[in-house]
Amino acid sequence: MARFTLPRDLYHGKGAMEALKTFEGKKAIVCVGGGSMKRFGFLDKAVGYLQQAGMEVKIFDGIEPDPSVETVMRGAAAMAEFEPDWIVAIGGGSPIDAAKAMWIKYEYPDITFEEMCKVFGIPKLRQKARFCAISSTSGTATEVTAFSIITDYDKGIKYPIADFEITPDVAIVDPELAETMPKKLVAHTGMDAMTHAIEAYVSTANCAYTDPLAIFAIRMIQADLVGSYNGDMAKRDAMHDAQCLAGMAFSNALLGIVHSMAHKTGAAFADYGAHIIHGAANAMYLPKVIAFNAKDPTAKARYGVIADEMKLGGANDDEKVRLLIEYLRGMNDDLNIPHGIKFYGADSYPCEQGFVPEDVFLARLPEIAKNAIGDACTGSNPRQPSQEEMEKLLKCCYYDTEVDF
Ligand SMILES: NC(=O)c1ccc[n+]([C@@H]2O[C@H](COP(=O)([O-])OP(=O)(O)OC[C@H]3O[C@@H](n4cnc5c(N)ncnc54)[C@H](O)[C@@H]3O)[C@@H](O)[C@H]2O)c1
Ligand SMILES: [Zn+2]
């Protein structure tokens, strides 16, 4: 038996935020990040609509990018004090993911972070509050997914919480919020969405319900991402829908080792000056993982279908896989994303020598590879890598060398 779960309601299109006016409840806590939602007036709008719905509103702000366990615990304490019956998270993947984890802790005050991370192990929520997510970036699709990614900075590891219990009750996909994104954010979140759709399509948990969503998302992202990056606002709006469709696919078909590797490298070099931003990590690793996974005949045929849907040409599946890899690398070039960790420099832009020195990378490689294999996303990857293979793959992602194993 398989399960397919999405939010009960999804409001989309310009002005969709107004749906908040129709919510029924007494108290809403609005969870938000560092300032962009306030600066562009979206936070005030959300608060105003909830007040029009007759609710008392409290704001929990300052949720940082790649939120920490500590932030989750602070937010849960604020919820315990205020006792909301609606949790409304507005912003990028970071504040929405943090709010999902706060929600678990609010409903179950004794639960530990370790217990939250047991895959599909969350107890029944909605005893105290329902959850609405309003996304302002076009990538994570956390407004429709069963996932939340929280970082343990002591360990330098990102942990996925995965359970349909945390699939929001209401998703609001209003493209107006995405129009204020700076270019770099468009690039990273857009390639995150492309990775979601491709990983979902080749995942071992793919099915007839997720395939059409994944394929349609891939075609839309191919058509719209680079234009959106270059300032075309109609394409920017379309990308907001495309990433959400990709999210509907991967929330139910799961992901693969591109995400396992992104989760385990993202915070691993934070002491050397920067995170490897989630979407940029995916963009760099995706072509390498496609080459690795394509050794599996079923995956190879599925990549072939993706190449066909993208109208890339190719006489057989080997050629189609090669053309797909080339196309994705071309997108990275168009979006100013480097091809390897070695070249991931200040501000995430390509450079000769990035912020992760070779000796540090090599010293940490065995541990990162072990952690990536243990990530919740590895189980649904079409090929299960050994420790040796994962280390080789990560090396290819560092040096941007060809994957031939
Ligand atoms: N839950 C899931 O299913 C899922 C899937 C993929 C990634 N993630 C996680 O989500 C996080 C990344 O989320 P993200 O990529 O959405 O970025 P983010 O939420 O970390 O935001 C990045 C920056 O962009 C700013 N910002 C957000 N929206 C903006 C807008 N419209 N205009 C101007 N600035 C804006 C924020 O203030 C922040 O400084 C990572 O922790 C990643 O691991 C979660
Ligand atoms: Zn992702």
Image (spheres, grey):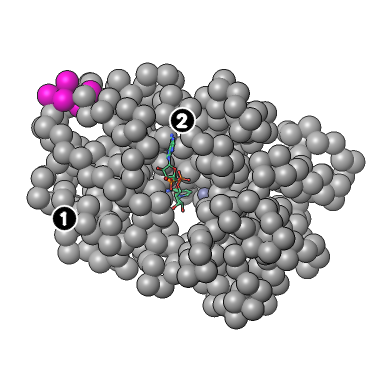
The numbered dot on residue 180 is 2
Q: Is residue 248 above or below residue 301?
A: above
Q: Looking at the image, which residue is at 44% across and 20% down?
A: 13
The secondary structure type at the circle numbered 2 is: loop
Assess mark 2: CB under 8 A from ligand 1? yes
Query: Pointer 1: what residue?
Result: 77
The quadrant of the picture occupied by the C terminus is bottom right
Q: Nearer the viewer, residue 269 or 263?
A: 269
First in sequence: mark 2 vs mark 1 = 1
Image coordinates of residue 275 in percent, x first then y, are 50, 60
**Viewer can see residue 118:** yes
Assess mark 1: CB under 8 A from ligand 1? no
Marks 2/1 in contact by CB < 8 Å: the verdict is: no
Alpha carbon separation for disc pair 2 and 1: 31 Å
**What segment is highlighted magenta in the picture?**
49-54
Q: Residues within 10 Å of mark 1 (few under 14, many from 20)?
A: some
